[in-house]
Amino acid sequence: MIPTALRLKKRSANLVWFFLIISLLSCGKKANPIIPVKASPKGIEDLNYQIKGKSLVVSWAIPQQNTDGSPLTDLKGFKVQKGEWLTRNFCPTCPDQFQETLWIDLKGPEQPDIRVEPDQVQLTFNQLHPGNTYFFQVTAVTKKEAESSPSKTLRLSWELPLNPPSELQVKPDQQGILISWRPSPSLIDGSAPEGLAGYFLERRMEKGSWQKITAQPITKTIYTDLELQENVTYTYRVKALRLVQENLLESEASEEKGIVYTRTAPPPAVQDLIAFLSPNGVELRWQGIETMTPSGYHIYKRMRNEKIPRRITQEAIKETSFEDRQVRPGTVYFYSISAVGNPPALVEGPRSTEVEITYNP
């Protein structure tokens, strides 16, 4: 009879040998299972809109990367969620609610209200109801059904927009580029321009994208752009804003006007002005400006009893001499001259030091 303690000890030894054999028979260490992770595209960051008459164009840039920084090569399309509520029932603090989901496939089929460009998508809505607030949210989807994070919600309270401003003018001045326009005359149905809240002035450099010059609407119809680079083409347009339920509804853009910016600093003062008698009056001569070639010169003249000189040249003259025949014998005259800068600004510089002469033929 084997004692119980000895039987337990023998059984324990057998278990040790059993687990040892199992471990020796194993083919090696096994790593933890790896769960494949689908790369998801970056979210839409620039959901925008444009007003075109009674139509609304919602647009966004096509993302080019995944969230991990890798190239986005398998983009399938976009899921667009759309909501519509009566503006009077709109709750700005409530969660977004969407009633309709639209699918845009990058491979088509082509539709008149969907425009897919190499870097942008545009979606046009024509059946909009005044008095309603619209919500839009866009999500990018890959061929493997990986989705980006939803874009920020675009909210728009729809009413009839204003007609765009007209008679846009763009010209240089001594500070920068001066832009002016005529205000919006009416809503697009011809009724009075209710709710005018100001204007958005937009600019683009060369062939770049449009950018708003000011973050807030401007109320005047004139603006000077000061942040400019030499010899760069700037193009401008302006939109009228209608305030609707604390939202700003933009009009269509005005016509576009472009200009190449060149520095408009005035020329320096002319030096070495001399005056002497001529057979027909008083002749003036001076030296040209060494640092530049002005487009011309203006002549100023006063008599002893006059404090402010008057300009006696209607157009800037090209020569560096001038004969004044409008003189009277025995009269003292004071002359000065200014240089005029080059087009398009034609900025006039300061007047030179006066020269005095008595006309005694």
Image (cartoon, rainbow, N blue to C red):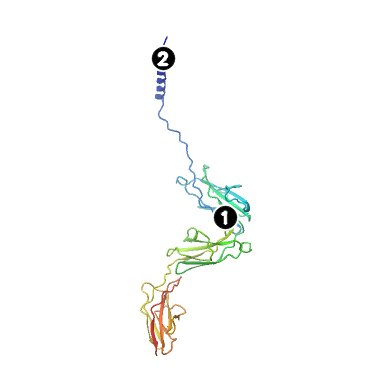
Considering every residue shown, the one lying at the far top of the view is 1
Separation (CA) of disc 1 from disc 2: 88 Å
Position of residue 221 measured from the top left corner of the image (x, y, whole percent): 53, 66
Q: Quadrant of residue 195?
A: bottom right
In the picture, measured across the screen, residue 328 lies left or right of residue 107, that is left
In the picture, measured across the screen, residue 149 lies left or right of residue 325, that is right
Q: Amino acid at mark 1?
A: Val
Position of residue 329 measured from the top left corner of the image (x, y, whole percent): 42, 90
Q: Is residue 258 above or below residue 148?
A: below
Q: Amino acid at mark 2?
A: Ala
Q: On residue 5, which mark appears?
A: 2
Helix or strand or loop: what does disc 2 sit on? helix
Q: Nearer the viewer, mark 1 or mark 2?
A: 2
**Residue at the image position 49 percent from the left and 63 percent from the top:** 235
Q: Is residue 23 visible?
A: yes
Q: Quadrant of the N terminus?
A: top left
Instruction: State which tag comes first along the sequence, 1 or 2.
Output: 2
Q: Which residue is mark 1?
A: 57
Q: Are marks 1 and 2 in contact (CB under 8 Å)?
A: no
Q: Is residue 110 visible?
A: no
Q: Is residue 192 above or below residue 23?
A: below
Position of residue 282 measured from the top left corner of the image (x, y, whole percent): 40, 85
Q: Residues within 10 Å of mark 2 (few under 14, many from 20)?
A: few
Q: Residues within 10 Å of mark 1 (few under 14, many from 20)?
A: some
Helix or strand or loop: what does disc 1 sit on? strand
Q: Is residue 360 above or below residue 218?
A: below
Q: On residue 95, which mark appears?
A: none
Q: Quadrant of the C terminus?
A: bottom left
Position of residue 187 measured from the top left corner of the image (x, y, whole percent): 61, 62
User: Which residue is more in the foreground, 161 or 121?
Assistant: 161
**Residue at the image position 40 percent from the left and 83 percent from the top:** 334
